[in-house]
Image (cartoon, helix red, strand yellow):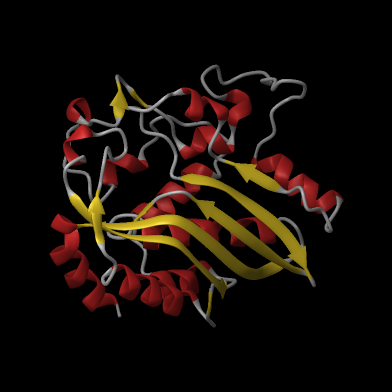
Amino acid sequence: MIRTNNLHNAIYIANTDISKAPFRKAGIWQGVHQYKDMDMRVLRNFSFQAPVPTRKEKLQEETQADQPWSEVHFQERVSGKPLNPGESYKIWPYNSFKKEQDPYMDGEVFSHTYMERFWPKRANDLGGNRNGIRYTLGDLADVIKQINDNPLTRQAYLPIFFPEDTGAKGGIRVPCTLGYLFEVWDGKLDCTYYIRSCDSFRHFRNDVYLTARLMIYIAQRTFTTTGNLTMHIANLHLFVNDEYAFNKKENGKN
């Protein structure tokens, strides 16, 4: 576990380590078979902990996430609407596909969106509650209510990886994020962020920004302030054909 005093340092350490990691075959990547024979550097079970700024401007300074996409997409995530596809995908800086050619879209929608996973009660039908095996599904608003009702709760978890993702049985793009656990400790909101797979070039900085930005959002609604982000990445990777662009980008940020 890397413990550091700001997110910039945590990101720098992660990017330094991934640039030295050994190569492995990529396999199928996000449901796209064309990457299966490609090499990528892989860093397994990378974890860090760092404090999160209380202001989004400082957060952007520390993470250097892709803007305006990251903030536009974050606002979609917390909109209360299970959007699919939403609008932010149109300004995703790494998208080289036209909508009708995008391999991640199934007709007019994506296989999933984080907006659907934040707000599953109304996904697809935009009305009424959906039931789980025994209880009504919860959403981000329920997590915030849990914290307000019981600041000492250890149950304020927002799942993103759903049983239907296991049921997809491969070949379908499923969420990289597993979920977020929020805990209030000494008046500060901590988050433990579990992610199974993370692309260093396209997603890592944005994933850190979006999670820390969510902490700021929840802290403002739970009479707390931001504490530490602990991020556990099972598979942090960098494709060999992205190395040049990755190094050029990182040299300009650090």
* Residue drawn at 16 percent across, 42 percent down: 37
Decide if residue 77 is on the left or right side of residue 111: right
User: 146 or 73: nearer the eye?
Assistant: 146
Is residue 62 shown above or below 139? below
Q: Assign the C terminus to one quadrant of the image.
A: bottom left
User: 158 or 221: nearer the eye?
Assistant: 158
- Give the number of marks: 0
**Residue 112 location, quadrant:** top left
Q: Assign the N terminus to one quadrant of the image.
A: bottom right
The spot of residue 170 in percent (x, y) is 37, 28
Is residue 44 shown above or below 85? below
Decide if residue 222 is on the left or right side of residue 191: right
* Residue drawn at 67 percent across, 64 percent down: 190
**Residue 133 location, quadrant:** top right
The spot of residue 134 in percent (x, y) is 77, 21
The spot of residue 57 in percent (x, y) is 47, 71
Is residue 156 shown above or below 130? below
* Residue drawn at 83 percent across, 57 percent down: 151
The spot of residue 204 in percent (x, y) is 38, 60
* Residue drawn at 31 percent across, 57 percent down: 237
**Residue 191 location, quadrant:** bottom right
User: 108 or 133: nearer the eye?
Assistant: 133
Decide if residue 230 is on the left or right side of residue 32: right
